[in-house]
Amino acid sequence: MRGVTPYSSGVMPYASLRDFIQRLESAGRLVRVKEPVSTVLEMTEIQTRLLAEGGPAVIFEKPIRADGSVSPIPVLVNLFGTVERVAWGMDREPHQLKEVGETLAFLRQPQPPEGWREALELVPLAKTVLAMKPGTKSFGTAPCQEVVLTGDQIDLAQLPIQSCWPGEPAPLITWPLVVTKGPSGAREDKFNLGIYRMQVTGKNTTLMRWLKHRGGAQQHQRWAKAGKTEPFPAAVVLGADPGTILAAVTPVPETLSEYQFAGLLRGKRVELVDCKTVPLKVPAEAEIVIEGHVSLDDYGDEGPYGDHTGYYNSVEKFPVFTVSAITMRRDPIYLSTFTGRPPDEPSVLGEALNDVFVPLLRQQFPEIVDFWLPPGLGTRAMRHEAEEQFGAMAAEMLRRAAAR
C-alpha cells in the first residue's frame, strides 16, 4: 500500500536529546555560545534573528538568570527553527514528511488489503506498531533521575527559565512536554502528551495554561467529574528526545499513544521510567522532569504574554500546578523557545507539519489536491486560528483530520 511502511533509517535512533544535538553539531546545524547571555529578553532577541535567517540551533553555555547569577545549566534554543531540523527530528528528510502523514492516515482509518500481496505488505507495519509499546524502568534507574530534589530543595528559580518579552509578569516555561493520564482505563484517558506553557508563580508553583479542548485539560476535567478529591497528577518533561517532542504536536491516531508513535518515528521504542511522586511514566533519557499536581479548584491569573499574533494575549484564569519533585541528569540541558509573530518555532513546526496534514485531509476530503497552512497559524493553535481566519469549514477540516 502506498506510503504505508514501517519507520526505519540507516541512522541510529535518537534515544535522547543529546543524540540529536550530536547529529546537529556534526552537521554544522548547532553552535555553542560561550559568552554570558541573559535569559531576560536577550535570548529572545537572538532567537528572533536566528529564525529570520534560518540559522542554527544554539546552546548558551553561560545563561544569566534574572537575579544576575550564572546558571550551571546550559540553555538550548532554536532546536526546531528550520523545516530540515523538524524532519531530522522525525528521522526523515523534508521531502519525506508526507510519508509520515500517509502512515498516520492509514493507521487512523486502515483500508482492507485488496489481495494477499497487499496483506503481506502490511505485516511489517503491524509488527512494528506492536513492538513500539514503550518499556518501563523502575524509579532511580534512569538518567533523568540522577539528581532528585524534593521538599525545601525545590526552587524553580534555579532553572534558567526565559522571560521573553517586555512587561510580562513572570518567567515562562515555554517547551514543557506535559504528561498526564485520565481517571479511567478508557482510550481517551491513556497517557497524553501536550505542550502547554507554564507561568512561574513561586518556588514550587506555576500556572498550567491548557485550553479546554486540549487532551490534558479534558483529562483534568474528567478527573474532577469522576469525584476525585486529590489534585490531578502531571509530569513536565523538559528536553526529551526529538521524536517524543514532535509526537506531542502531531495528529496521532486514537489507536496509538504519543509514546508509541514516538517509537515509530525513532524506529525504536521509547524507554519510560516511573516518577517519584506521581503515578506517571516519563522518558528515561529526558534532561529534566518536574513532577507535581494540578489543582481542581485553585486558579490564578495567567498573562499577559507575547503571543503568535504579535500582541500580548489577555489575562485568563488557569489552574495552579504545585511541584512535588524535580529530577534531572547530573549535567542537564534546559530546552527553551519563545512565542511571537512568525517566524517562531511554532510557525516552523506548522510549516513542516503541513505536509503531514495533507494525506490526513485528503482521507476525509478526497477532492483536496493540496493544502497550505500559512506560517502565521503556528502549530499549537492550528484549529483555533483556522476558525478565526478561514471560517468554520477550515476548522472542521482540521478537527476531522486531527481531533484526538
Image (cartoon, helix red, strand yellow):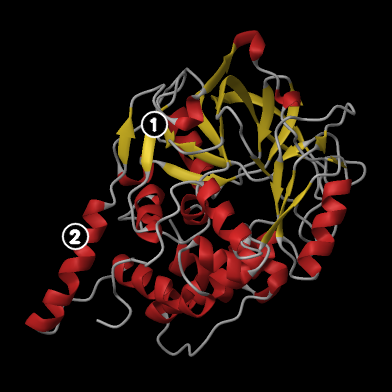
Secondary structure at numbered mark 2 = helix
Question: Residue 122 got which mark?
Answer: none
From this viewpoint, which residue is outermost toward the left? 116
The percent coordinates of residue 112 (x first, y second) are: 17, 76
Q: CA distance from mark 2 to mark 1?
A: 24 Å
Circles 2 and 1: CB atoms closer than 8 Å: no
Secondary structure at numbered mark 1 = strand
Query: What residue sits right under mark 2 in the picture?
Result: 127
Residue 395 visible somewhere in the drawing: no
Q: Is residue 334 above or below residue 262?
A: above
Question: Residue 273 got which mark?
Answer: 1
The percent coordinates of residue 108 (x first, y second) are: 32, 66
Q: Is residue 141 above or below residue 400?
A: above
Question: Local crowd at mark 1 within 10 Å, few (<14), some, or many (≥20)?
Answer: many
Q: Quadrant of residue 190?
A: top left
The percent coordinates of residue 224 (x first, y second) are: 47, 28
Q: Quadrant of residue 385?
A: bottom right
From this viewpoint, which residue is outermost toward the top? 152
Q: Quadrant of residue 203?
A: top right
Q: Nearer the viewer, residue 369 or 165?
A: 165
Residue at the image position 52 percent from the left and 65 percent from the top: 88
Labels 2 and 1: the sequence-earlier one? 2
The percent coordinates of residue 208 (x first, y second) are: 64, 35
Residue at the image position 39 percent from the left and 22 percent from the top: 139
* 81 lies left or right of 287: right
- The quarter of the picture where the C terminus appears is bottom left
From this viewpoint, which residue is outermost toward the front? 26
